[in-house]
Image: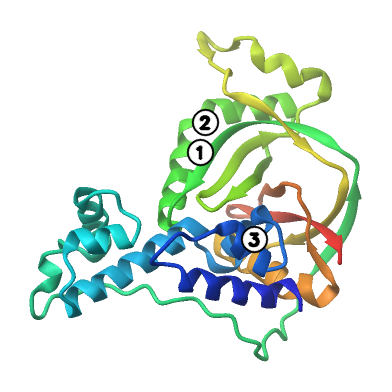
């Protein structure tokens, strides 16, 4: 059975253990993959991290129990992994918009996050341009943050990260001698999220320059946060979005299509290596536009 079908078994395992300890390693085993690979594929296909999925499903079930049963709030909190009524009440209110005690009232409005399911169905029929490239190992330089939580949380974290590192991005562009190309590197996937680097293709002889103060006019940029990013040798699936002002939605759809449809149909899987996003900026006759390359590390199965 291929690894896409195995994800359905992993989700069934998670659903069966929402009221006790979810062993993510066991869920990964049922998906015929490693924990990091399972976390990565789950996030790409579903949009949620494993931890966020479990949290939302538990809060959904907790709300239903309080609305339709006689269980005490403390018992429901402990059942779904919360150490105290206060932490449970805070999470409950953030999700449902009301307190756990209010959920017991007649007519209380609760939210529901439905369980995911994977089914074999007739899909596809779309055309995806791609190429496969072999690359030697190389190094990049970048700022790292860990993105966690819901898609909305991670989108806000990404926006804050990009705004907070503007000066560093300017310096990276200068070090790589290319202001029209930006790199993002995604790696170290886990149930809580993943590490994201705003990176540059900096020449090897400048990789260690970041340890010294860099001057921009009269200002000094603190580049202590810059870290080398090691990219191992291997094979890559490369796809491109449309050329437009806002290619982000196209990027997410194309990434999901590549992982969910192209990889299993072509007999490939993601290998243990970072994923790379390459944003290319260009001017047409009227607007500054861009397109995004997706570099997915792959291996034959």
Q: Residue at x 41, y 51 (%)?
A: 153
Residue tagged by mark 1? 162
Q: Secondary structure at mark 1?
A: helix
Q: Residues within 10 Å of mark 2 (few under 14, many from 20)?
A: few
Report whether 186 appears left or right of 48: right
Residue 153 visible in image: yes
Neighbor class of circle 1 (other Cα within 10 Å; few <14, some 14-19, many 20+) is some
Residue 152 coordinates in the image, percent (x, y): 41, 56
Q: CA distance from mark 1 to mark 2?
A: 6 Å
Q: Are marks 1 and 2 in contact (CB under 8 Å)?
A: yes
- Residue 269 at x, y = what percent? 78, 64
Judging by the rendered image, the residue that carries numbered circle 2 is: 166
- Viewer-side residue, 243 vs 229: 229
User: Height in image: 56 above or below 81?
Assistant: below
The answer to which of marks 2 and 3 sits earlier in the sequence is 3
Mark 1 vs mark 3: in front? 3
Along the polypeptide, which appears first: circle 1 or circle 3? 3
Marks 1 and 3, how far apart in space? 27 Å
User: From this viewpoint, is residue 284 visible?
Assistant: no
Cβ atoms at labels 1 and 3 below 8 Å apart: no
Q: Which mark is residue 187?
A: none
Give the residue at x 29% y 57%.
78
Above or below, comparing residue 4 to residue 153 in the picture: below
Quadrant showing the N terminus: bottom right
- For disc 3, the marked residue is 38
Q: Quadrant of the C terminus?
A: bottom right
């Amino acid at each position: 059975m291929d690894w896409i079908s195995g994800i359905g078994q992993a989700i069934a395992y998670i659903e069966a253990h929402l009221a006790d300890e979810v062993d993510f390693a066991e869920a990964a085993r049922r998906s015929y993959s490693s924990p990091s690979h399972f976390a990565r594929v789950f996030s790409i296909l579903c949009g949620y991290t494993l931890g966020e999925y479990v949290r939302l499903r538990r809060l959904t079930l907790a709300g239903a129990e309080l609305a339709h049963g006689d269980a005490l709030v403390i018992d429901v909190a402990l059942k779904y992994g919360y150490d105290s009524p206060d932490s449970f009440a805070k999470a409950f209110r953030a999700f449902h918009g009301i307190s756990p005690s209010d959920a017991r009232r007649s007519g209380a409005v609760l939210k529901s996050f439905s369980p995911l399911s994977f089914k074999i169905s007739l899909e596809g029929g779309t055309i995806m341009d791609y190429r496969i490239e072999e690359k030697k190992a190389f190094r990049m330089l970048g700022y790292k943050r860990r993105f966690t939580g819901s898609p909305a949380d991670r989108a806000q974290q990404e926006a804050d990260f990009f705004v907070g590192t503007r000066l560093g991005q300017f310096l990276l562009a200068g070090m790589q001698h290319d202001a029209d190309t930006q790199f993002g590197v995604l790696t170290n996937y886990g149930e809580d999220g993943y590490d994201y680097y705003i990176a540059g293709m900096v020449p090897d002889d400048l990789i260690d320059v970041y340890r010294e103060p860099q001057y921009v006019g009269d200002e000094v940029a603190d580049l202590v946060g810059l870290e080398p990013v090691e990219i191992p040798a291997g094979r890559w699936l490369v796809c491109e979005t449309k050329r437009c002002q806002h290619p982000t939605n196209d990027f997410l759809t194309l990434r999901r299509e590549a992982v969910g449809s192209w990889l299993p149909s072509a007999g490939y899987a993601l290998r243990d290596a970072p994923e790379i996003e390459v944003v290319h900026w260009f001017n047409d006759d009227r607007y500054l536009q861009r397109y995004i390359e997706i570099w997915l590390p792959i291996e034959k199965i």
